[in-house]
Structures are given as C-alpha cells and as structure tokens.
Amino acid sequence: MRYNMVRASKQKRARRGFSLVEILIGMVVLLIGILAIARIFPAGFLSIQRTGDYTVGQSLAKLQLTDMENQVALPEGILATIQDASGAIKPVSNISPDDLSDVGPATLPAGVPNGVDPYYYSNINRKRFIKGEPVRLPVATPNAVTGQYGAIYMLQFGPVFNAFGTSAFPSDSIKVYGAEMERILQGAIATVDNNDTTPRIINDTQYTIDYQNQMIAFFPRVKNGRAIPYRDFQIQIDYYINDGGRIVVTPISTNIRVDDVDPPLSGEALRPVWRSIWYNQEDQDRNIQKDFTKPKPTDFDDTLSFRKEGEEVSRRFRLVSSTPVQTSGTAPTWSDDSYEYAWYSQQWANNANGGVLLFNPLGRTTTFRTSTGNQPLTARVDYLTFDNHIIREDRAVPTRAPFELKLSLPNLLTQGELQEDQTAYNGMFRDPGNTATPAVLIFNKATGEQIDAFTGTCTGGVGAGRNFSINIRTGTIRLNEAFVNANNLQSANIRIYYRAAKQWGMQVQKAYAKYSAVTTSASVDYKSYFAPTTGSRVYFAISETGKSVLLGEYYVKTTGGEVKHFNNETYQLSPDKTQYENGLPYLDLKDLHPEAGSEGWSFNSDVTGRALSNVQGLSLKSRVIWLDSSSTIKDSAGNSVLLNHWKHNDTDTLLTNVAGR
C-alpha cells in the first residue's frame, strides 16, 4: 500500500507542468532570440534594395551608352556651364567630372545671378550643355499636326531648356549652325607689302580674317528677289587679356549679318567687303540688334588681339517663328534659303521643350563645296538639357498586341506626391508658378508628334480616354490598341520622358572632340591643352580629369639632340586631384615611353612648326545617379540643411572612329 501511494505522488508531480517563473524565463530567452534574428532583416532588406538599385543603375547606364554608340555622330562635347546675368551660356572648366555635390543659394558658381534655382547647378545637372550635336538634315516627313511636309529631327538629350525672345526677330535659347568654314588669312589694311586688300575668297564656304585689325569678309550673294536678303554667320573665337601679368585666353561668341547685294553691272564681278567683327555704326544704320552682334569687350586688348587660327566660323540657321508648330497647328513659312529651322514640339512651363526641331525641306538636297568635293548640308546644335533628372528612354512598339512597354524604373512620380524636400511634385518641369506640367511625355521619334502627355494624380493605373495606360508603381505603359492600329505605330520608335522616386538621373560625359593649343597653363579650358617645351607632360583643364585623349602627332627632342616623331597614341589624364600638377590634370609621355625621363624628352617644333597637333578626346561615359538617403544637419548659422547622399553607376567606353571628326 505504501508503495502505491509513493508512485501516485510521483505521477502527480510529473503532470504539474511549468511554473509561471519558468514560462516567463523561457519567453524572455525566446524573445531575445527573435529580436536577434529580426535585427538581421532590416540590414538584409537594405542590402537587397541597394543591390537592386545598383543593378538598375548599371542597366540604365548601359542602355544610355548603347544608344550613344548607335548614333551616326556625336556632339563635340558635353560640358558643365553657367548662365550669367545676361542669359549667356558659358562653359566652365574648373568642375571635376566626378563632382556630384549639391549646390545651395550661397554656393552658386561664380557668374550665376542671385535668385537662380541652385537645383539646376547641383549633382548630375552640372553637365547640361550639349556642344555641336551634328544633324544630317533628314528626309521630309509627313505628320498629322500640319498635314504637310517637314524635315523632323529630335535632339538626342531632351527635354531641352528653351525660352523664346520677345524681339522683332524670332529668337530662342539654342544655336543652330552649319559646318566650319574654310579660313583664309589676309590683311584688311593696305601696307607697302600688301597693296591689294580685296578679300581672296572664291565661294561661300570661305571667309577671310585679319586678326590684328579685327576685320572679316564673306563671299557676297546676289539678292535675286530673295524673301530673306541676308545671311547670318557665327564666330566663336578666343582673345587674349593681360590679367595682372598673366596672359589669359577668353572665349567669345558673336554673330555677323551680311546683307545680299544687287546684281553687278555688266563685266563686273562680285566683290567681298571687309567689315568689323564687332557691333558698330554700320550695324546701327542697318538696324541690326545689339544682342545679335556683340560690341567689343571692355577688356579686349588691341595689342594682344585674337588667338590666331583658333576661331570657328559657320553659317547660322535662321529661326523662322517663335511659336512651335504643335502649338500653332500651322506649318512654318519656309523661304528659298536652306538654312532655316523651327520648333515642332510645344513649350512647357515657358522654358522647357521636348526637343523636336523642324528643318527647311530644301536642306536635304542642298550641298556645299569643299576642297574634297561637294558635301551634304549638315547642321550643328548647341543647347542646354532642361534637367538630367528627367529620364529619357527610347523603345520600339511591339508588332502585335498587347502593346506593352516596361520602363527601366518603377515608382514614377505623379502630381501631388511629397518629395524629399517636402514640396509637392507638380510635374517633370518644376514650374515655379505651380502650374501642373506632364508627369509622362511620349513622342513618335519618326514624325516628332507627341503621342500623349499625362498630367494627373494616381496610385495605380490610368488610361480612360487616353492613348495609353500606365501603371505608376511598376513603370509599365500599355498603348491603346485602337490608337496603335489607327496610326500604324507597330515597330515605331518612341521616346518616353518621366521622373521616378529617388531622384534618378542620367548624364553623358564626353571629352571634347578636338583640343587646341594655348601658350600658358593659365589659359587652358575645356577645349584646349598646354604643352610646354620643357618636360614630357601635357596639361588640361580640371573638367577633363580622368579622360582619355589621342595625340595625333608630336615631336620630341632628347638631351642628345635627336628628334623623335610619334603618331596616334592614347593617354589617360591623371584621374584625381592628388595627381594634379599646379592644380591641373595632365598626361605624361613616360606612361608609354619610360625612356622619356632618362633621355630628357621635351616637345620640339623644329620640323613642322608645331610640336603637338591633332589632339582629340576619346572618352565617353554614361552616368546614372540616385538618391540613397537624406539627412538633416545644422549649418554654421544654426539653420537646418537637407543633406543628400547620392549613389552612382558609371559605364565607360573609348571612341575609336575619331579620324573624321
């Protein structure tokens, strides 16, 4: 009996379970374990997110670079710029290509007037100026807006900054001009050695220049009842100034209007006429705008004058109207002069445009004479991109339904969304007047027509009554099937503009096509180099840091007196500031020729008069940036300042076919 009672007591204790203290202890241990594991997840999620951002950035950068490589020709350069108080666009040379810092009102670049939005000079927007984008005038294309023919061209890097002028002559913010003309040097003032000062030019692709007397002459053209009885020429030239003992090169761009002449009398020939490069009394008499031909700069030194054989002179294209065709609905009134253009795409927020130009259809069949024979008429365009944070993607419409396109980025921005700076998003063009501008723009690249412009607020898909539907979160666009069929858009190339969360941005960096020589290191800029006659280094502007260049031909002399000759060698400039010399990046011949040091090489001009010639830029870089995070800090005055932390992805290549540029 005792045995049974003891056994029952043991069984009862076994069924009792855990006490409250034991349960609490167990829960604490379990919670500690769970928290330890949970702490891993945010870091893991952040790592996955950042890896995804880098993957998307790499894909977008490669896509942009592939698009550039498929272009028939590239711009001369893509540059950092300022726009001064007069509205003039001036390239700057002291900004490093890798500078992604944000600019505030107190740190705007020198020359930028107060009140300008620093956003347009920050991070990826430092490089906005497209210099010399080449355009082989296209075949005339019919379009639905005018029902008539026009030669459509869509600029490579839209949307474009543009504002129309209010003067009597149509004006805008871009420059459109033809091929570089042939230079002939000649004195304009009679001397003992030069009695005949008649300009020695024989056709309209040449000009004659006298640097010392600041005169220029162009081949005359007979009026013959022309609707536009004049031609405009653009001169981009450098002049020297004495800056406290330093001789500094200063670039300037001016224009000259040349009136057509009456037919010569029987037996007489057309005679070119010398004229001043600067705005003068003759221009006043002919009622030419002062903002067209510039007056002589106040710092111009008549003794030093211009930098010889460094200018570029071209025929300018005439803007025929200050109203875009898409706004007016009427075709431009073209004249019998091929050098004419108009804007096709409409303006947004008064200073933004999709970047579609329309050229006089005569241009396609016009040729001009050169020393190598007749060449087709080409145009070159200088312009500012409106904002590199606007994503630009080209896509081909599928051949069959569903006509769906997947953009590279999700989470497209639409009106009303709160941005990182706590302001409400009002469209891709940041209209300071708070007028809603499009969140998505779609163009047909072949015809220049705007397929649609979406402006509105949404959280998912939109499309009722539109030519497309869009899923904002996934970045998917579906074109309306009936619209595609009605307009034969199958396989058509379209361009899509949009913005996405995280302030994604795209930028192309390109070394200048061809650098020219200057005589001092203080004079180097984005398009020049300095090669001293001592040593084996060639110096460039800070803006060219890390870029690769081709030395077309150079001569050096050793300390033993031997002259050596080399052709077509590629060098990379010093890639960071720690490798600068006298504040400038450089290339060193020792990188390819170690013996340059032991043999005491120095550049030598005894053979041809030029120690170094035909220096060309080779670098082409595609950069994509995005906002990784933001934080608020206090500045020295105690004010709260938003600090952005940017990430970027670069894809580089070297241009190989540069001989013909």
Image (cartoon, rainbow, N blue to C red):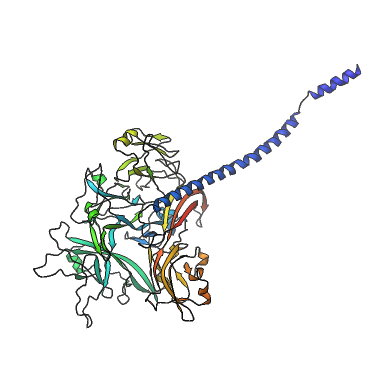
The N terminus is located in which quarter?
top right
Q: Is residue 137 above or below residue 215?
A: above
Residue 208 horizontal side relative to residue 587, left or right: left
Residue that lies at the very extreme toward the left in this rendered image: 266
- Give the quadrant of residue 370: bottom left
> As rendered, which of 231 and 34 lies closer to the eye?
231
- Judged from this view, the residue extending furthest toward the right is 2
Quarter residue 464 falls in? top left
Q: Position of residue 23 (x, y in %)?
A: 73, 31
Against 382, residue 50 (above or below) is above
x 53%, y 44%: residue: 49
Of the pair 194 and 111, the residue shown nearer to us: 194
* Viewer can see residue 643: no
- Left or right: 298 with respect to 192? right
Question: Which quadrant does the C terminus fall into?
Answer: bottom left
> Most extreme residue toward the front, as rendered?
373
Looking at the image, which residue is at 36% across and 70% down?
249
Residue ID at (21%, 49%):
332
Pick the front one: 270 or 170: 270
> Where is residue 171 shown, x and y percent of the image?
25, 55
Residue farthest along the bottom direction in this orientation: 192
- In the rendered image, which quarter is residue 529 located in? bottom left
Where residue 204 appears, as percent x and y from the top left, is 22, 65
- Relative to residue 143, is residue 649 drawn left or right? right
Q: Give above or below for 47 relative to 255.
A: above
